[in-house]
Amino acid sequence: MAQRDRALTTVLVRLVDTLVADYDPLELTQQLVETSVELLAADAAGVMLADADGHLQVFASTSEELRLLELLQIQSAAGPCLQAFHTGTPVRVGDITETTGWPVFGQRMLAEGFRGVCALPLRLREDRIGALNLFTAEPGVLAEEDLRIGQALADFATIGIVHARVLADSLMVNDQLAHALNSRVIIEQAKGMLAERAGVDMDTAFHALRRYARDTNRRLADLAHAVVDRGVELDAVLSGHRPQP
């Protein structure tokens, strides 16, 4: 338990860093999904956030396959994440084969190798801004302790985003979220360029992009724009080479 407490403290510090240094919804949500898989008995995780019009958008995931699965929820307007967002209550499914509510999503989920899913709302009192999905390869609902920590992480991320809305003008935060959505598109383009260049999958390309952004102290979205605009060498990003001054 002490070891887990130390791990939880470490990841909370990481989440705090994404808020203190420079508020970035993309980095905050990516830290949330990676932290969830690191601490909990989940094999994959994804986050959706609501845009200014209240429509959910995929903001972060632990794999390219999961991002596509999350997009399917939005396209079919059905799935545990949407339900958790709209109701404000957790959704727990131990075995997707025993659930008939989301047939299209369920088939795709099985095809990607997942049997269980828990969706936790990102909420602060009556304010709901998105949801966190936790997937497991084996059937069975996550343990209560895992769900408690997962909801705490989701609540922490929610507080960070809502707090930024309070400190800044809410329109400005909505603009940030809209900008982040646009940046997500650019990031996907950059991932594709890197994947094609190196002959690697999209997940590997994303990790290379994110690592280079950290090594060069740049925002992920800014680096993605530079990749797409050819303002940075693709090979430098792929190799993790820090540019010479």
Image (cartoon, rainbow, N blue to C red):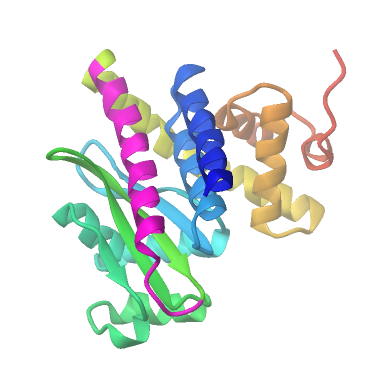
The C terminus, quarter of image? top right
Left/right placement of residue 89 relative to residue 29 reads left
Q: What stretch is highlighted in magenta?
A: 138-166
Relative vertical location of residue 174 with respect to residue 194 in this rendering, above or below: above
Residue nearest the viewer, comparing 75 with 88:
88
Relative vertical location of residue 25 with respect to residue 199 in this rendering, above or below: above
Chief SS of the magenta region:
helix
Residue nearest the viewer, comparing 34 with 142:
142
Left/right placement of residue 145 relative to residue 224 reads left
Extreme residue in the left direction: 126
- For image coordinates 22% across by 21% down, the residue present is 170
Extreme residue in the front direction: 2
Residue nearest the viewer, comparing 171 with 167:
167
Q: Where is residue 113 in the image (x, y as percent from the top left)?
A: 53, 77
- For image coordinates 49% across by 78% down, the residue present is 138
Q: Does the magenta stretch include residue 185?
A: no
Q: Position of residue 133 (x, y in %)?
A: 38, 58
Q: Does the magenta stretch include residue 139?
A: yes
Q: Where is residue 144 in the image (x, y as percent from the top left)?
A: 34, 61
- For image coordinates 56% across by 51% down, the residue present is 38
Quadrant assignment, res 174? top left
Quadrant assignment, res 83? bottom left
How many numbered circles are shown? 0
Q: Where is residue 239 in the image (x, y as percent from the top left)?
A: 84, 40
- For image coordinates 72% across by 43% down, the residue present is 208
Extreme residue in the right direction: 244
